[in-house]
Image (cartoon, rainbow, N blue to C red):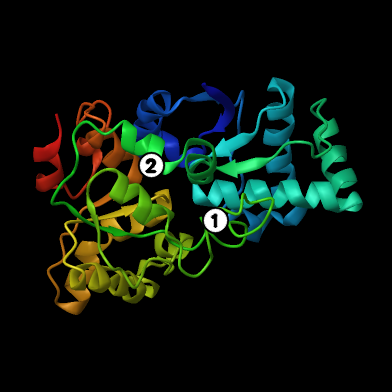
Amino acid sequence: MTKKYTYYPGCSSQSSGSHLDTSLRAIAPKLDVELEDLNDWNCCGASVAHVEAGALAVKALSGRNLANARQQGEQDLVTACAACYLKTHQANEKIINNEEMRNDVNEALGAAGLSYDGDLLVRHICEVLVNDVGVDKIKEQVTNPLTGLKVAGYVGCQTVRPFADTDRGGNYDSYDDPTFLDNFTKATGAEATAFDAKTSCCGGAVALISPEKTLGIIKQILDAASEADADVIATPCPLCQQNVEMYQGAVNKKYGTDYNIPVVFYSQLMAVAFGMDGNKDACLDRNMIRSEKLEKMAK
């Protein structure tokens, strides 16, 4: 039976992470997931906004999204972006548990004729895939198994910290050694390689502001993927995908390496494994570093 969720795409879905958004929307119906777009959504204030704007302003940004979501119904609010999830879930919990913050946020929202009392659950789409859909359901949709593809599952830090191993976070995985991404990989028929950097930070927004400060930690991620002999790195996080893919040239220039490792989203792997179109659905043509091996597997 299809289950409906209010879907918060987030800013990256309109640009650097559009291939996550499009491939997720492509696979969702096959997994009995209906994603109803959040009406009139706004930026959650992730990355640098909280530094300049302050805690209340950021909570009010997410509060507005939550208030709009509540007007659409009581279904859970889900997002695929790790940063959007972190900020929106954090704001939701503060509104629920801190009366002073709830009053301040609602005072700000009142200027737009909105209010929110904290009666929705904010969820990451990966937790939905684990707990509501299940890996067995994912396996059932595979008609084009990715046999022979070695995948380094790069979870990153924000998808599982700090909420994944909590009741409100769905209790779907651990902070230090998450397995959900490897399980997704195996469900598609690909090989999940041992990958020591699976929860390492990519530098986040610092990489966008001062990339030279983060090239070393991005190199460590690439080193680990190379040591694992991975054909591709797969991630659920738009910023992780962007940083690890985009700065390989800069890493090579600084450290004398020759990395050219494709970095894809788990949803792209699923779309190919589900027998969907490699470009229209899996969006493999949107990756800066193209995976010839994965593209040859696509329909």
Instruction: Compare marks 2 and 1 and give the one earlier in the sequence.
Output: 2
Q: Give the labeled residue for mark 2.
A: 17
Which amino acid is tagged 1? Answer: Ser
Name the quadrant containing residue 135. top left
Residue 47: assigned label: 1
Q: Is residue 214 found left or right of 57 in the rendered image?
A: left
Which amino acid is tagged 2? Answer: Gly
Q: Nearer the viewer, mark 2 or mark 1?
A: 2
Q: Is residue 296 found left or right of 102 in the rendered image?
A: left
Query: At 48% across and 36% down in the image, what residue appears?
Result: 133
Q: Is residue 152 among the parts visible in the rendering?
A: yes
Query: At 78% across and 52% down in the image, what residue appears?
Result: 94
Give the CA distance from mark 2 to mark 1.
15 Å
Query: At 32% across and 38% down in the image, what residue appears?
Result: 139
Q: Picture coordinates of residue 264 (x, y %)?
A: 28, 48
Query: At 21% across and 47% down in the image, what residue appears?
Result: 288
